[in-house]
C-alpha cells in the first residue's frame, strides 16, 4: 500500500540568477509567466526561451477559454520544457500544456481524453500558498460547465519544483494573505483527511506550525516586517502541497469552488469564507477524533483554550484578511441550494477526503450558517 510520495525534485534558491545558472533556460523552453514578473526578474538575463504572458489572455483564475486561446498561440512552437513562473493560475495552465492532446478541455477534465505527457515541466511559484508546484492536480473554471473542476493524474507532476525566495518578497498584501491562508487550509484539510498517513501528517502539522507562528510574529511586529518570515512561509506552503498531494483536500475546497466560480472570488479568500465553518461542523459532529489533535496543536501555537480555538484562529487570520459572510459576495438563498447540489454532484473527488461523511443536507447547513 502506498504510504507517501514526493514526485518533483525540490530546489531552493535565494535569487533568480541562481536558478538561471543551474537550469540554463534556452530556445527549447517555453516560459509561461506574466509580463510584470518576467520584466521585473528575468528580462535582464536575455533568455532565448519562448515567452508567453498569461495575463495577455485574461485575468483571474484559469478558465477553459483562457487556456484554449493560449493553446492556439503555442501550438506551432517547438519546445521541450515548460517553465511556469507565477501563481496558481499560471501553474494550473502550464500543467495542462505538458499533455499531448487537451481539446476540448471539458473532455480532458471529464477523462474522455487520455492524459499523455510529452513535455517536461519546471514550476516556480511566486506566491506562498498554492503548493501546486508539488501536486498532480490542475484546477480550471470550466465556463462551458459553469463550475470549477480538477484534473488529477500523475502526468501533471512537474520534474522540478523550484522555490525562489526573491520572488515572494514584494507580494501585494492581498496576494500574500489569500495565498498564505490557502496554504494553511491545505495543511489543515490534509491533516484531517482519512487518507492521511503518519508521513503526510508530518508535513501537514509542520506547515501549520510554520504558518501560524509566522503570522503571529508578523501581527505582533507589523506588516512592514513580514519579509523575514517569507522564507518559512514559502517552505510551509510547499510542505502543505506535499501533504495534500498525498492525502487530499476536502469540503472547504469543494464548497469554495462554486462561490469562486460564480462570483469571481480569489481562491484563498473563498476558502477562508468556508474554512472555520467547516471545521466547526466537523467538531460538532465528531469532536473526539483527529480534529481533537488538530485543535490541541492550534491552541498550543495560539495560546488559547480549546473552547475558543476557532475564534482565536479567525482573530489572527482577520488581521490579514477580513472574513465575510457569503451573502456579502452576492450569494442568495437559491445559491445555497444550487451550490449544495454542485458540491455533491461535481466535487466527490474532494468530498471523499472529508473528516466525516457529509451529505447534501450537511453541506446546505454549513452554507446556511455562513450565509
Image (tube, rainbow, N blue to C red):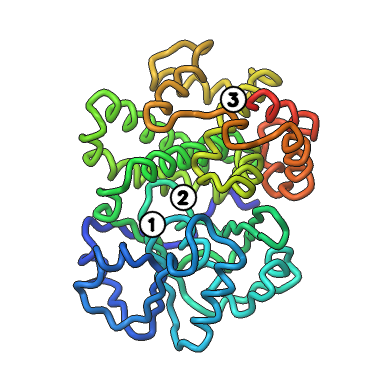
From the viewer's perspective, is 287 left or right of 41? right
310 relative to 93, above or below: above
Element type at mark 3: helix
User: Which residue is at the front of the view, 66 or 238?
Assistant: 66
Between 122 and 8, which is closer to the camera in this rendering? Answer: 122
Say which of 2 and 35 sits in front. Answer: 35
What numbered label is drawn on residue 130? Answer: 2
Q: Residue at x 68, y 21 (%)?
A: 286
- The crowd level at tag 2 (other Cα within 10 Å; few <14, some 14-19, many 20+) is many
Q: Position of residue 53 (x, y in %)?
A: 40, 70
Question: Which residue bears the numbered disc 3?
Answer: 291
Marks 1 and 2, how far apart at CA: 8 Å
User: Pointer 1 and pointer 2: residues touching (CB < 8 Å)?
Assistant: yes
Q: Secondary structure at mark 1?
A: strand
Residue at image mark 1: 125
The CA distance from mark 3 to mark 1 is 30 Å
59 relative to 175 in the view: left or right: right
Of marks 1 and 2, which one's residue comes earlier in the chain? 1
Q: Residue 118, image x and y in percent? A: 55, 80
Q: Looking at the rendered structure, which numbered label has been put on residue 264? A: none
Residue 32 % position (x, y): 41, 70
Counting residues from the start of the chain, the first of labels 3 and 1 encountered is 1
Helix, strand or loop at disc 2? loop
- Residue at 28 percent of width and 27 percent of height: 217
On screen, 174 above or below 362? below
Tell me which residue sits at (49%, 19%) in the image.
Answer: 296
Which quadrant holds residue 341? top right
The answer, for residue 188, to whether it is visible in the render is yes
Tell whether 65 sits left or right of 364.
left
Amino acid at each position: 500500500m502506498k504510504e507517501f510520495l514526493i514526485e518533483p525534485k525540490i530546489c531552493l534558491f535565494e535569487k533568480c540568477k541562481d536558478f538561471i545558472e543551474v537550469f540554463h533556460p534556452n530556445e527549447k523552453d517555453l516560459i509561461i509567466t506574466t509580463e510584470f514578473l518576467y520584466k521585473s526578474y528575468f528580462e535582464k538575463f536575455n533568455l532565448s526561451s519562448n515567452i508567453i504572458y498569461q495575463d495577455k489572455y485574461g485575468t483571474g483564475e484559469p478558465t477553459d477559454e483562457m487556456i484554449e486561446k493560449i493553446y492556439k498561440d503555442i501550438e506551432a512552437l517547438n519546445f521541450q520544457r515548460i517553465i511556469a513562473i507565477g501563481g496558481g493560475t499560471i501553474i494550473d495552465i502550464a500543467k495542462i500544456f505538458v499533455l499531448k492532446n487537451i481539446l476540448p478541455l471539458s473532455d480532458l477534465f471529464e477523462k474522455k481524453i487520455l492524459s499523455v505527457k510529452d513535455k517536461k515541466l519546471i514550476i516556480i511559484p511566486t506566491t506562498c500558498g498554492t503548493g501546486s508546484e508539488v501536486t498532480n492536480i490542475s484546477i480550471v473554471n470550466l465556463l462551458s460547465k459553469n463550475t470549477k473542476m480538477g484534473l488529477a493524474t500523475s502526468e501533471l507532476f512537474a520534474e522540478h519544483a523550484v522555490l525562489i525566495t526573491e520572488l515572494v518578497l514584494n507580494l501585494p498584501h492581498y496576494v500574500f494573505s489569500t495565498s498564505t491562508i490557502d496554504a494553511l487550509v491545505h495543511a489543515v484539510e490534509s491533516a484531517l483527511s482519512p487518507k492521511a498517513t503518519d508521513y503526510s501528517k508530518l508535513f501537514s502539522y509542520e506547515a501549520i506550525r510554520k504558518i501560524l507562528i509566522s503570522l503571529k510574529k508578523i501581527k505582533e511586529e507589523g506588516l512592514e516586517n513580514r519579509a523575514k518570515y517569507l522564507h518559512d512561509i514559502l517552505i510551509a506552503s510547499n510542505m502543505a502541497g506535499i501533504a495534500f498531494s498525498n492525502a487530499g483536500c476536502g469540503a472547504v475546497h469543494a464548497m469554495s469552488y462554486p462561490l469562486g466560480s460564480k462570483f469571481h472570488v480569489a481562491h484563498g479568500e473563498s476558502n477562508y469564507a468556508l474554512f472555520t465553518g467547516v471545521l466547526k461542523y466537523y467538531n460538532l459532529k465528531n469532536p473526539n477524533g483527529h480534529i481533537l489533535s488538530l485543535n490541541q496543536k492550534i491552541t498550543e501555537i495560539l495560546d488559547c483554550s480549546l473552547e475558543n480555538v476557532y475564534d482565536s484562529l479567525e482573530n489572527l487570520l482577520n488581521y490579514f484578511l477580513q472574513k465575510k459572510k457569503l451573502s456579502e459576495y452576492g450569494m442568495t438563498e437559491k445559491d445555497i441550494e444550487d451550490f449544495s447540489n454542485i458540491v455533491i454532484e461535481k466535487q466527490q473527488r474532494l468530498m471523499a477526503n472529508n473528516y466525516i461523511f457529509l451529505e447534501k443536507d450537511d453541506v446546505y447547513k454549513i452554507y446556511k450558517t455562513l450565509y
